[in-house]
Amino acid sequence: MNKNMGALVMALDQGTTSSRSIVFDSNYAIFSHSQTELAQFFPQSGWVEQDPNEIWQTTLYTARQAMEQQDLMSEHISAIGISNQRETTIVWSRLTGKPVYNAIVWQDRRTADYCRKHQQHGLQKMVSEKTGLLLDPYFSASKIAWILDNVSGARAAAERGELAFGTVDSWLIWNLTAGSVHASDVTNASRTMLFNIHSQDWDNELLQLFNIPPSMLPAVFDCNACFGYTAEPLFDGAIKICGVAGDQQAAAMGQACFTKGMLKSTYGTGCFALLNTGKTAVQSQHKLLTTIASRLNGEITYALEGSIFIAGASIQWLRDGLGIIQSAEQSGQDAQTSDIDQDVYLVPAFTGLGAPWWDPEARAAILGISLATGRREIVRAALESVCYQTLDLLGAMHADWQTVSDTVLRVDGGMAVNDWTMQFLADVLQAPIDRPVITETTALGAAWLAASHAGIWPDRDDFASTWQCQRRFTPNMCVERRNAKVNGWNAAINRVRTAP
Ligand code: ADP
């Protein structure tokens, strides 16, 4: 091992499609990296599940691999930070540590009817005033209720105080500490629909509404708090866990979006745009979410968020479902060589539509197919759909918060490496976009949190000044063509929505 690399920090980045662990050195550079894919199950239309044990085991495996690759011992790792897929709901026994059901993934729509009933009872206003969220199956509350109502014996056990609920961060912390810590951070808590983002505490009225016993809930800490230490048998010694944030909030930190008005968009399984609104929790009038961007040493920052459920997931579907591409990387080349005169649209409502439509019943469609349409045009339509959806989100952000206009969008995530898509994004937005040198911003954000707690990277401005643009994409499509394409998208979306 190179002994001159300074203090090291390890980020555990548990995403929807993969678990990865990245060790960063004291210059914010990647020192070692391990990643492994994990399975999703689709038991019924609109249902999405994962195995909680696989989530934990792949995380542990990659952490051990990342250390072994460089002969690292626990003493070399100053701190661990965690970033995770958000909202995904796990309920487990406090007595055995075993999950009572699979993880219900954020994309899952099984509670659409349940949420609609609450909407019909006029509860949307109260819920969004307290949580900044919309009554949608996306968030954890209705998923917990589903588990308690559908898993035999679960409600009785929960009422006896024997069950714990957690988003993926809590589940990992529980396992990392061998069941001694049941905790979450404010950013993850703010996505459960049980947490009041203004008082920053669990909300009794919401707990009653969803019929969830308070004893199931984790303690909620600052993002850069000390969450505990890894249990001795996991690594060769204990490592401090002192940074936790939901993946999108972590990515915003990794993109150094620390000041009011800064904006990032992450293109992974889904696409999530976060606009830092400082100390103000902006209540959206255009169906965006108000969420907690971070709480550092007690200091809160809010964000406006636009959430799109399907971005890279369409590319996975082209690969694994349709089998018309061999790899995600191939998609850019296919789009490049497709027939640009064909206006094919793919509206990727595979699990309904997120912001700004919030239509859980909508399902995906491909429109504008002619006999000339081939594989490549469909691939291009999938990539383009991500850009049109970003346009819809940013339009809603502009309408909610005027000062967004002069911000350059910072992009990251697995799909951001696709040059063709990023160029099309700049064309559709008619605005420049910046891609950083480090696109592993989610892990970097988690590492920064842990490192700032551990005193390794204490200065936020110093960290922000290391952010480097790898490439700026500027618009080069003629406006008439761009407008025609956007009009075609708007028509396609209207064909797919169930309640236009
Ligand atoms: P997550 O954290 O949600 O698991 P990632 O940020 O790891 O997601 O990104 C993975 C997603 O990015 C996958 O859905 C994959 O299809 C997509 N992806 C990866 N590389 C490319 C590429 N070159 N072009 C388009 N999509 C890509």
Image: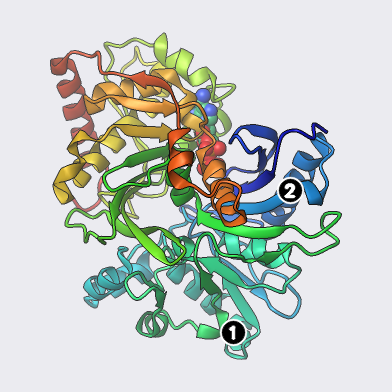
Does residue 318 appear anywhere in the picture?
no
Q: At 30% across and 68% down in the image, what residue appears?
A: 116
In this rendering, is residue 155 above or below 337? below
Rendering coords of residue 243 (x, y %) = 57, 57
Q: At 23% across and 31% down in the image, what residue appears?
A: 489
Q: Mark 1 points at which residue?
A: 158
Q: Mark 2 points at which residue?
A: 77
Circle 2: residue type: Ile
Circle 1: residue type: Ala
Earlier along the polypeptide chain: callout 1 or callout 2? 2
Comparing labels 1 and 2, the label whose residue is closer to the camera: 2
State left or right for residue 296 relative to residue 64. Answer: left
Rendering coords of residue 388 (x, y %) = 28, 32
Pointer 2 residue Cβ closer than 8 Å to ligand 1: no
Q: At 53% across and 50% down in the image, what residue appears?
A: 458
The secondary element bearing badge 1 is classed as: helix
In this rendering, is residue 90 above or below 284? below
Q: How many marks?
A: 2
Does residue 337 appear anywhere in the picture?
yes
The secondary element bearing badge 2 is classed as: strand
